[in-house]
Amino acid sequence: MINIAVLGYGTIGAGVVEVLEVNKKIIAHHAGYEINVKYVLDLRDFPNDRIQEKIVHDYNIILQDPQIKIVVEAMGGINPAYEFARKALESGKSVVTSNKELVAKHGAELLKLAKESSLNFLFEASVGGGIPIIRPLNRSLTADVITEISGILNGTTNFILTKMQMEGLPFDAVLKEAQERGYAERNPEADVEGHDAGRKIAILSSLAHGLQVDYDKIYTEGITKITDIDVKYAKYLDASIRLVATCKTVEAGTYARVSPMLLDSDHPLADVYDVYNAVHVKGNMVGSLKFQGQGAGKLPTASAVVGDIVDAAKHPHINIPMYWDEQKLELLDIDLVPVKFFVRVIGDINENREKIDNLYGNVKYVLIPSLVNEFAFITEEFTEKEHREKLSNIINVVSKIRTTL
Amino acid sequence: MINIAVLGYGTIGAGVVEVLEVNKKIIAHHAGYEINVKYVLDLRDFPNDRIQEKIVHDYNIILQDPQIKIVVEAMGGINPAYEFARKALESGKSVVTSNKELVAKHGAELLKLAKESSLNFLFEASVGGGIPIIRPLNRSLTADVITEISGILNGTTNFILTKMQMEGLPFDAVLKEAQERGYAERNPEADVEGHDAGRKIAILSSLAHGLQVDYDKIYTEGITKITDIDVKYAKYLDASIRLVATCKTVEAGTYARVSPMLLDSDHPLADVYDVYNAVHVKGNMVGSLKFQGQGAGKLPTASAVVGDIVDAAKHPHINIPMYWDEQKLELLDIDLVPVKFFVRVIGDINENREKIDNLYGNVKYVLIPSLVNEFAFITEEFTEKEHREKLSNIINVVSKIRTTL
């Protein structure tokens, strides 16, 4: 039997306890030991819940109990999660977490600490919820140079964009519904401004390149400026608007970015709907791979956490190598990143056409009959800086979205 | 440095040598050692190829060289692959293979042998080519009871069915083109009769349940009877015909089957085109997951083989646990498997309707205006045996295809 402690009895913590209970037998078979939750750390008490007998309020009880081999951090945020994770590793306990903030910020350091102590720091659930992506990146795709890793990594924004697409509603109305249904937080900034996706692509990029990618260095643009008119154009073009987090290597270097993208219908991420997540990986040998599943939710996320608990239980004094050094990956300046834009302009196409043609050369114009006094065009590939210079000459640009069209 | 030997310098063997060469640096970084191909076993000589200096014709040279730690079996077939794999393990060398016949037939036994000797027998490339699926099943989804695993596991038949769908051509014409383009063998039986997919689903089912599933016990039906008229119905219904290999647990038990399926457009496997492969996994906690990528081809398959070589190199005297006992999984008799059918009938619908309604109760009729003197219907769920009995009463049934519609 292996004893573990769960930190935080919120959605994920409760999910972990539930998965360990429901699938007790098969989990014991895979781990080689029965997994026993000895403590659950929470500030609250749960007087009408069987969990109450395991509740402790003092983390030192867990740290000082030599029976505890694995600590499951399910609290979220940096404080005190970071300190608790570090102390667990320093006390000879492996750590499993679903906390993308913690992993994005302190992943390299905690991995190093785990390695030095022949322990493990595992975080499959921190990106893509139940989708196995951390372990495949780290242990399967070891023969490839990863040239691109792109994903739909935030279920809330994908729900909003899907709903806008299906029902033609404006952003604010859909956000309100998402909040009412519990898919979006009351303060939705981390989701809709792209910060959550940014932390997740920082983790994936770091693992794909073996070097630290800081999430605050990643160009991040949210979906709050996407309007129902933009979505109308997308539908007219048989395309989809998605919040895409990407890390890609091009001739000029490797860049990372989170932004809305207008995706053509053949793009691997175009058909990812609702709260689903997907990760698209390109390797120089394996070609294109896609991993899709439930990127959030109590049980899928808990399933990934428990998968890591099993792995930690199977490797009690063996560090599973992970390639993520503290050294920084040099990212290409966003100004130098090549990209195509979809650009919407208010005004008459005939009065603007000559100027646009002179600035851009070849563009594809889009006119929707029912939309008067506006038009759109799709550019060829230029750098972000070149686009900014060109577009500064065009009056009344009302939206511009990066595109694969 | 770790020395390895490659058995067979065909497409996969040459791909393995190429991947190890092109990505030498990153592979060494992941493995912790440089990987050196010391021998390539082949009956042939390659006088104008640099590989010639490594070619040996006698397997004993490899077996007797204590420097060789890993043997890569890339010959295919059972003989002599099985004997060679067994002898390698008996000589203290780990074995990596892409050979689904070998793995489906002798996987459990070779895993046991590897475990007893603290070696590894790895076979990520045997199913789904470059798609990571064996390792995620074995090492990520350890917290779940797998209730279904279904896949498009054969690129040749998927290319044929996609082409029939896109171009409305009959089976024979498309098969001929696939043979000319090298996508289908001159003797296409293993692919088009479903035997290749059957071996692959046998491997996945065995790993999902931890027990042996014999591929010759799996109900297998190929695509040779699928006509361009069937495809016309599929398009009319906004559905797709795919060769689906599945292992699913229902109330009555667990069944395994390979057969053409008429899939509704929302089915996770409906949008898998051309030579792509995909695997859809359902777990009782994680929900629905989909893994998609290139299921065949020299470099994607070699990428998976080299990923296993890296894993074997990282675990020189440590057996990586795999859950696949020699004990058989009891499969539900195919007669008792519940299924819906799409049924095509030659004749007038009005002359048949009463009989069909009496036999089946609720069915959905399908009439395509341009097809005279025939119609189709889609049943509700009954067992295979019940369907057989009911359909024996209907004259002129020209095709029946299992369906999710």
Image: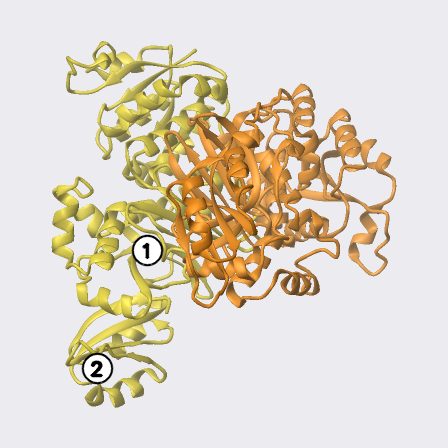
Chain colours: A yellow, B orange
Residue matched to label 2: A393
Which is nearer the eye, A117 or A174? Answer: A174
Give the chain letter at badge 1: A
- Mark 1 crowdedness (10 Å alpha carbons): few <14, some 14-19, many ≥20: many
Going by the image, does A221 lie left or right of B390? left
Residue matched to label 1: A244
State which quarter of the image contains the N terminus of chain B. Answer: top right
- Mark 2 crowdedness (10 Å alpha carbons): few <14, some 14-19, many ≥20: few
Name the residue located 21 percent from the left edge and 85 percent from the top edge: A349
Q: Which mark is residue B346?
A: none
* Mark 2 → mark 1, Cα distance in angstroms: 28 Å
> SS at mark 1?
strand
What is the x, y in percent for residue B147?
Answer: 45, 31
Amino acid type at mark 1:
Val
What is the x, y in percent for residue B285?
Answer: 37, 30
Viewer can see residue B1:
no
The quarter holding residue A181 reads top left
Compared to residue A317, the image places residue A239 above or below, namely below
> SS at mark 2?
loop
